[in-house]
Image (cartoon, grey):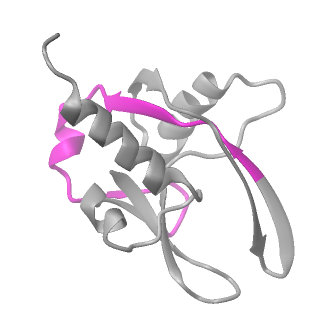
């Protein structure tokens, strides 16, 4: 999974978050995701499928925040991106990098909350599907 690393403002615990961003006024979530990848990485993506939406409240800098995360499985149109270990996020200090899903199952903190469980269930569904 392509993620960037952050640090929780209160506990300073390290977390990992998939790339994405906020929606502009009246923007469709799919259009917003395509725009965000263009802005953040200069990359074109194809949306393969929508995953369940997650809703969370959390503390950040002594404030309670609320987020609704529209989640999608995507693929990069430029296959060479998968060969890059890190990708610089445009106009930001963050560097995106590939992290195995197994790291999250073994305890690394993936946000938004609930995403690790959702991806674990998705992987189980994929692995248990047969040719029937």
Where is 46 relative to 56, above or below? above
The residue at the point 63 percent across, 30 percent down is: 32
Magenta range is 67-93
Task: Report the label total.
Answer: 0
Residue 18 visible, this orientation: no
Where is 4 relative to 118, above or below? below
| 12 inside magenta stretch | no
Place of residue 127 in the rendered image (x, y in percent of width and height, measured from the top left): 20, 35
Instruction: Report whether 19 appears left or right of 21.
Output: left
| 73 inside magenta stretch | yes
Instruction: Report whether 54 appears left or right of 105.
Output: right
Residue 10 visible, this orientation: yes
The residue at the point 35 percent across, 52 percent down is: 2
Instruction: Report whether 40 appears left or right of 26.
Output: left
Place of residue 122 in the rendered image (x, y in percent of width and height, measured from the top left): 36, 38
Camera-side residue: 107 or 30? 107
The residue at the point 62 percent across, 46 percent down is: 21
The residue at the point 29 percent across, 41 percent down is: 123
Q: Residue furthest bottom?
A: 11
Residue 46: name its quadrant.
top left
Camera-side residue: 83 or 98? 98
């Amino acid at each position: 999974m392509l993620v960037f690393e952050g640090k929780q403002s209160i506990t300073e615990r390290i977390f990992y978050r998939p790339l994405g961003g906020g929606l502009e006024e009246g923007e469709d979530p799919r259009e917003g995701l395509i725009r965000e990848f263009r802005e953040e990485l200069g990359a074109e993506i194809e949306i393969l499928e929508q995953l369940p939406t997650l809703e969370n409240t959390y503390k950040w800098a002594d404030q309670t925040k609320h987020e609704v995360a529209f989640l999608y499985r995507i693929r990069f149109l430029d296959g060479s991106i998968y060969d890059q270990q890190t990708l610089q996020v445009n106009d930001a200090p963050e560097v995106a990098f590939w992290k195995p899903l197994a790291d999250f199952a073994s305890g690394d903190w993936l946000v938004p909350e609930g995403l690790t469980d959702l991806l674990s269930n998705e992987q189980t569904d994929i692995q248990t599907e047969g040719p029937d």
